[in-house]
Image: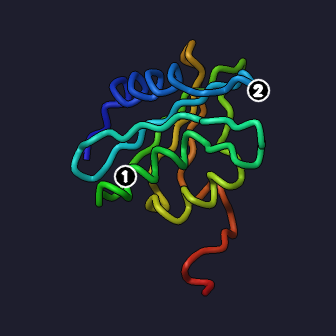
Amino acid sequence: MSIDWKQLFAAAETARKRAYAPYSKFAVGAAVLADDGTIHLGCNVENASYGLTLCAERNALARVVVDGKKPVALAIVVDSRRPTPPCGACRQVIYELLPPDAPVITRTPRGKQTKYTAAKLLPDAFGPRDL
């Protein structure tokens, strides 16, 4: 499947602009490309009880699951000086839901980016095979 990264990052930027981040001011948007070509968005949603904060990546991936699709690529836009990788919790969910060779690219709104694969984000990961 061909990936239109320009479209995927535009969608992630749209999601980032909708982020609810009044405490950290760290707005994150994510866009997941599903196996049928649909794009599913997520943004971070903070909470005064910080542990209840929802990450953009997990929000977007959950939407793919709800819609009965399979994720094939993930674009993340982070309003920071450098492309910021997903947090540990998001890496675990990415490992579980995306194929190991699936591209995960994080970038800033100014276009600086870093590329990963789902497997490289969480080496020696705990997963379904360990149960």
- Given residues 34 and 83, the one toward you in this image is 34
Residue type beneath disc 1: Val
Q: Quadrant of the C terminus?
A: bottom right
Q: 21 or 102, which lies in front?
A: 21
Where residue 116 sits in the image (x, y, percent)?
Answer: 57, 45
Left or right, 119 with reference to 32: right
Cα distance between the residues tagged 2 and 1: 26 Å
In the rendered image, which residue does mark 2 sit on? 24
Q: Nearer the viewer, mark 2 or mark 1?
A: 2
Q: Position of residue 7 (x, y in %)?
A: 33, 26
In this rendering, the answer to whether 12 lies above or below 124 is above
SS state under label 2: loop
Q: Is residue 21 left or right of residue 58?
A: right
The residue sitting at 72% across, 18% down in the picture is 81
User: Mark 1 sits on what residue?
Assistant: 64
- Please rate how many residues cluster around mark 2, counting C-alpha atoms within 10 Å: few if below 14, some from 14 to 19, many from 20: few
- Please give the name of the residue rendered at 59% of the width and 35% of the height, measured from the top-left corner: 44
Residue 75 vs 118, above or below: the answer is above
Residue 80 lies, in percent from the top left, at 70, 20
What amino acid type is highlighted by mark number 2?
Ser
Q: Residue at point 39% right, 27% down?
A: 11
- Residue 12 in the image: x percent, y percent? 45, 28
Which residue is drawn at the image coordinates 31% and 49% (left, top)?
34
Q: Which mark is residue 4?
A: none
Q: Nearer the viewer, residue 18 or 95?
A: 18
Q: Residues within 10 Å of mark 1 (few under 14, many from 20)?
A: many
Q: Secondary structure at mark 1?
A: helix
Q: Residue 115's image quarter?
A: top right
Q: Earlier in the sequence, mark 2 or mark 1?
A: 2
Quadrant hosting residue 85: top right
The correct choice, above or below, for 114 with respect to 88 in the image is above
